[in-house]
Image (spheres, rainbow, N blue to C red):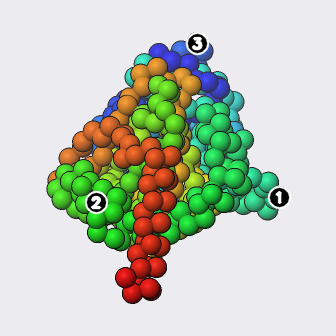
Amino acid sequence: MKKLTVKGQGVLVFPTIDSVLLLNKENDDGLSIKYTNDFVVVYRIKDNTMIISKKLENTRGSFFISLNAQTQELSIGFGEARFENINFIYKFDKQLKHFLESIEFVSSDNVKIIKDPIKKNIPLLIKNNLSMDDIANYRYMPISALSPVCQKLYNCISGKNFVLNTPDFPDFSKAIDYSIKTPGLWCNKKLIEKSNEFGKSNLDETYLRITLGNNNGESPGIPYVMEIWPKGHYSPIHSHSSANAIIRVLRGEINVSLFPFLGADKEFASSTFKKGDITWIMPTLNQTHQLKNQSYKTCVTIQCYSYDEKDVSHYDYFDYIDQDNHVQQYEPDSDMDFLEFKELMKQEWKGKSLISKLLLTGF
């Protein structure tokens, strides 16, 4: 038995669908939620009165229950615990608010408890300096609503100086493009080398991982990774296994599709982020996704990862779906250190300039 963080509210996430009791302090009243033959039936424990009988659809992925005594709502769904994945919402009579507020315990130990009930939508784009209209329409994710770990990551990479092209190398992005499209240069060769990284040979399912700094044991792999996405390239559908993450677009644009769970048939949300945009991942939200560069030019992102402060297991992989629809493990690696990569791009770019001069002079 586990205690809710706040009486009468929260999200309960179970690995699989099961029957469960939501109980008051005395354990003599609450809600009995039973699942059988694709139906969920909810009873009031005190008098064994049936409140809900509902056939469930799409019963794949983890099972979640959201209780909100303030709005007198009970929601049930599958996959990532968010509004888009709710199977149905039941509205209690307002007279039962006090009863719902008395619920304090869940009978199962095999449950993850999230403090706040599910909101109608969760913005994917982070914005600082919100207006009153922004807050009223809930258009953007406030920085204050991020986890403490995500806030730290955001503060590291959100500044105006965190850019790709710098005074010491203003042509950095052009040099990356040149290296990608030119046979024999590093980016071109590395992408071809990685074409089997996620199973069967597929050059489009590749991207480059340029790491910044060291692995200090606080993240799956090195925490800061510059990822390079040539036009039309994409990642496999993958899950970040409860990590925190902040993603900023440094060049171009990237499309992010979210899935309710690993192996889901279809996405439940999709957004395209352009240069300067910042999005997020937290331990219970946005965990399973796929990134695609659907634009006409190379995209470059900075991905920042960290385990949650309460995480003591430190799963060092992300799980992905291969081309045969099987779940596989991927250990985040580094294709090259950032400083080494930047110097290499400078040398390749100088080589291009030298070739151009030789062609112009006829040598």
Circles 2 and 1, Cβ within 8 Å, touching? The answer is no
Amino acid type at image mark 2: Lys
**Residue drawn at (78%, 55%) of the image:** 130
Residue 347 falls in image quadrant? bottom left
Residue occupied by mark 2: 189
Q: Position of residue 18 (x, y in %)?
A: 35, 31
Q: Quadrant of residue 143?
A: top right
* Residue pictured at 26% horizontal, 54% vertical: 194
Quadrant (top left, top right, bottom left, bottom right) of the C terminus? bottom left
Above or below, 7 against 1 in this view is: below
Asked whether the beta carbons under mark 2 and mark 3 sit within 8 Å of each other, the answer is no
Q: Residue at x 24, y 50 (%)?
A: 197
Mark 2 or 3: the one toward you: 2
Locate residue 48, reporting x and y percent: 47, 27
Q: Provide the residue designation for mark 1.
A: 132
Residue at image mark 3: 26
- Residue extending farthest to the right is 132
Report the residue that reaches farthest toward the top. 26
Q: Secondary structure at mark 2?
A: helix
Q: Could you say which disc has been placed on residue 284 in the image?
A: none
Q: Residues within 10 Å of mark 1 (few under 14, many from 20)?
A: few
**Disc nearer the start of the sequence (2/1):** 1
User: Which one is earlier in the sequence, the residue at label 1 or at label 3?
Assistant: 3
Mark count = 3
Disc 3 is placed on an element classified as loop
| Residue type for callout 3 | Glu
Closer-to-camera residue (160/54): 160
Q: Which of 33 and 174 lies nearest the eye of the viewer?
A: 174
**Near-viewer residue (193 or 81):** 193
Q: Is residue 182 above or below residue 79?
A: below
Which of pointers 2 and 1 indicates the residue nearer the eye?
A: 2
Q: Is residue 235 visible?
A: yes
